[in-house]
Amino acid sequence: MANYKAALDKDVTKRYLAIDQGKRTQAMYIWIDGSGENLRCKTRTLEEVPKSIADLPIWNFDGSSTGQAEGSNSDIYLHPVAMFDDPFRLGNNKLILCETYKYDHSPTETNHRKSCVEVMEQAKDEHPWFGIEQEYTLLNTGKHPFGWPADGFPGPQGPYYCGVGADKVFGRDIVEAHYRACLYAGIKIAGSNAEVMPSQWEFQVGPCEGIEMGDHLWMARFLLQRVAEDFGVVVSFDPKPIPGDWNGAGCHTNYSTLAMREEGGIKHIEKAIEKFSKVHKEHIRAYDPHGGADNARRLTGLHETAHIDSFSAGVANRGASIRIPRQVGEDGKGYLEDRRPASNCDPYVVTEAVVRTTILDMPLELP
């Protein structure tokens, strides 16, 4: 019987990718599918290199295969909204982030970008800045944490956070490749580090203003999964991938307005925290794709989290819902960190919720 390999030879692929393609451009269209968590992509040829979003045509796909339409009326429109350089195909090739629209041109249920854009436009004079810390876990193709013993567990948490050494760090090659891919693409990646649980990592994106935060984080997630694909490793954004005495994975959201960043900004930070306290349950529902069900496994009051049912805030307190960084407390201005969003959150939903609550005083429109 023939023995087929699922992993192909990348050196062979490189020979073909080196072929000159002239002025024609490969544009990979990328979108969020019906799960609200997963990304899909497909490629088309453009005769010229696009200089802006206006140069990119609206396209479509089979929504019945992505959980976004019925087979009898399956076409879903792809509207390009953000363009990045392609670190895999290189050259003039592009990655195109898209919004999804139904046959009647209304947004699909998982297109939360449209409403986020509208909210950010209303709040633009406040210049809302965001920086998101994306935690994730590397798994082997059997969905077991990458680098963990096949029939057991590694040593207890402690030496892995920002660690170094083959017995403490698993998968650094993926992290380094992803970082460089983000820089090439134009993602505002700010840093990366190994996290508390072994095979768990974090990268940070920002500062980004308004809608740019969601655009850059979603594209950074795509790049991470695409890089890991080359290594034969799976990326998990599950908020609690391993039950028991192991840290979960969050998407801590750092946030400030212009007033918070100026002298005396701490008063505006405290006012925002007071507003958060009054709508805690609504934010919990918005902060993971399953209305808080995923986050309930993570926000237990243990492992550097506040309990999901209570709201708290404090300076340098990683067990609080909202943390004011120590330096911010000393300077009397800066930003706050919302530690509640889950690692699989939709950043469009999170950033919209934050701005609705703290700037616009508008009720949340929950997914």
Image: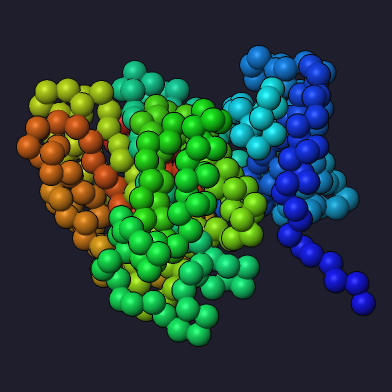
Which scheme is used to colour this image of the protein?
rainbow
Quarter-wise, where is residue 7 in the image?
A: bottom right
Tell me, yes or no, if residue 362 can be seen here. Answer: no
* Residue displayed at 36% across by 65% down: 168
Quarter-wise, where is residue 42 in the image?
A: top right
Between 364 and 349, the one lying in front of the other is 349
Q: Residue furthest left?
A: 330
* Residue displayed at 62% across by 73% down: 142
Q: In what quadrant of the picture does the N terminus appear?
A: bottom right
Residue 167 position, x and y percent, is: 38, 68
Q: Residue furthest bottom?
A: 151
Between 150 and 30, the one lying in front of the other is 150
Tell me, yes or no, if residue 170 can be seen here. Answer: yes
Q: Residue furthest right?
A: 1
User: Is residue 142 found left or right of 240 in the rendered image?
Assistant: right
Residue 314 position, x and y percent, is: 14, 51
Between 121 and 305, the one lying in front of the other is 305
* Residue displayed at 81% across by 24% down: 21
Residue 221 position, x and y percent, is: 54, 46
Residue 129 position, x and y percent, is: 34, 30
User: Is residue 192 found left or right of 111 in the rendered image?
Assistant: left
